[in-house]
Amino acid sequence: MARKIDYSALLFAAWFISFSIAVQHDSSVQRSFIIDYDNNTFLKDGQPFQYISGSIHYFRLLPDSWDDRLAKMRAAGLNAVQIYVPWNFHMPRPGQHRFTGSADLDLFLALAQKHDLLAIVRAGPYICAEWDFGGLPAWLLQRNASIVMRSSDPQFLAAVDEWMAVLLPIIARRLYSSGGNVIMVQLENEYGSTGQCDLAYIRHLYQLGRRYLGNQTVLFSTDNTLTCVAKERQFYATIDFGVDGTRSLKDTFAPLRALQPKGPLVNSEYYAGWLDHWSSPHVRVGAQLVADGLARMLAYGVNVNIYMFFGGTNFGYWNGANSPPFEPQPTSYDYDAPIAENGDTRYKYQLIRQVIKDATGRQPSPVPRNSSASSFGRVKLQRSASLLGNLDSLIVNRLDGKLPVTMESLGQFQGFALYGTQISEDFKAVAPSLTSSYSLRVEKVRDFVYAFASSSSKPSLGQFLGFISYAESAAVLNFTASDLSSIRNIWLLVENCGHVNSGPDIQGNVKGIIGQVTLNGAPLNGWRSYSLDFDRLAAKLPYAKRLAASEEPQAAQASLYMGRLILDKNNLTDTYANLSTFCKGQLWINGFNLGRYWPCAGPQVTLYVPRAVLREGSNSVAVLELLQAPCLSDSSCRIDFLREPDVGFRSKSVADSAISLRFRGKFAVPSSADQLPSVDDERI
């Protein structure tokens, strides 16, 4: 079986830390963390304090790596970590609360305290974070697609109250004043960017914070649009900026000082890197630029959080998307951070460590050694099962109606849904008998459609008609067919590429087929809408219905490919799966969903495979390929497991100007791993 995470040891460590905290809390020293407005500083236990923090998202790495990343953050000289808390990760469905495994918030905070790291918690309910729906649960849209997110809409507030009644008491137990390590809590995030100013909502969140966290806890906001929350003067206002903003710190902080004349200066997100999007070059921010900007801020007395210090991975379907225009983030959230996706320290890390040492005069602890990664060679794959041929194993829910229904209406909050309809006799009667050209038009699609046709009323491989991408200006698919009987049934497999995580399109953020579908202008009615669970089939591939030989010439898209990775017990390390011979889909190893791959678009080509998902002996490898048929010849039916990653060899080194980078183009996909260029990502 896969290498087990020793949760018992981690839980004992958490208990021991909590016990030690309780003993310490009973001592005569009163722990406190407050704002000294007159002297423009924080006071920790009565003494001036400047925090130097780094962002890490515990939900973007597996728990057995938490200790390593936190140790490296402390060894860099940081005295705090900043985290988001994603509501949808902890509450995937109404009434279901997850606080174990990767969602064990209490354990993560305890481990941070073990490493003498304070914690700054950004508790939501909205977090952004390039995370699916900005951390909001998509089941809110199942209740009411018109609910106004991030507002005083009664339905939204009722759900927020329910969630905060669960979350905030957990944070309260970890407050610094109670013996824990949480010094500050943010409610909401960058609210000014919404264009809204619902003060009833903001005041409601403030009251929740005070109710559960007490009157002494520092509640803060992060915003560069200071026309709403900052003017309310309830939350302590902070801003965020990158390298360019450090060149004249007086000017950068001037708008904030006009509203908040006194108190410590805080940059809650100092950008050490930047996010990527599919079909855009990988973004890098120069290491020396980042280090020099940090040095200027520390000398100026700014409290700094470096975003991100460790980025991590969007496993499964957890990536978000910016909009407009709709631009989903890839699986890797490496962020060009000081600590790479697999935990290796980069040259940027070493420079930051030296800057902090020079600024504080403190010798940091030794840096833990970098993780080892291995090349496991080539694994041959075989096309094993079709999705539509295994529909019985995939269906979670079905709704029938005149029109398709949204994924959220089906209870499908991530992943894929299937829509099927039968072409009526009326259409065949009016269809041009001599034409073979057809035009399928969808009123609105979110986000990516894979269209199939079949002569059977049961879902089957049939004919692959093509795809409709979210990048298309119109949701239209033109195709040809010599015989209309071969397309008696239309099947639309729809991929949710990630709920919008920021901007105005976060409202009404539903997925699937929305509205009317027409064929050559004639409405197609009578739709069957299915919610699907691909993880279920990937975990049960040995029991899936095998492909008949006659099916091979038909559509090979939307099929699962299977292989085995054999590992020795002494060689269980991280690795990277190179999927350059595939185009677009998902990868599972031992049933664990490692995320989306899309080398046809780039920039990411390899997927990070953490050692915790591997096991001694045989490891099952399952690939869901959606767009191409790479395995019709044995030579191309493979995955290469490599020692080095490729998250974007077409990289661009930039500073803050990277934020406005927009590019969409075709990426050449190497035909073999040998053609992959070596990538210098400044890892030490």
Image (tube, helix red, strand yellow):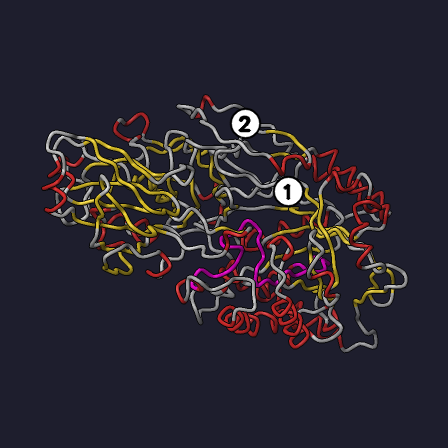
Kind of residue at badge 1: Ile
Q: Mark 1 — residue?
A: 339
Return the x and y of residue 194 as percentages of the image width and height.
59, 55
626 horizontally vs 522: left or right: right
Percent x, y of residue 632: 25, 29
Secondary structure state at the residue bearing disc 2: loop
* Magenta span includes 116: yes
- The residue tagged 2 is 650
C-alpha separation, residue under disc 1 versus residue under disc 2:
20 Å
Which residue occupies the foreground of this view, 568 or 458?
Answer: 458
| Residue 138 placement (x, y as % from top left) | 44, 60
615 left or right of 182 in image: left
Q: Residue at x 61, y 55 (%)?
A: 195
Magenta region: 112-139
Residue, x 55% and y 39% (percent of image)? 276
Q: Is residue 225 left or right of residue 162?
A: right
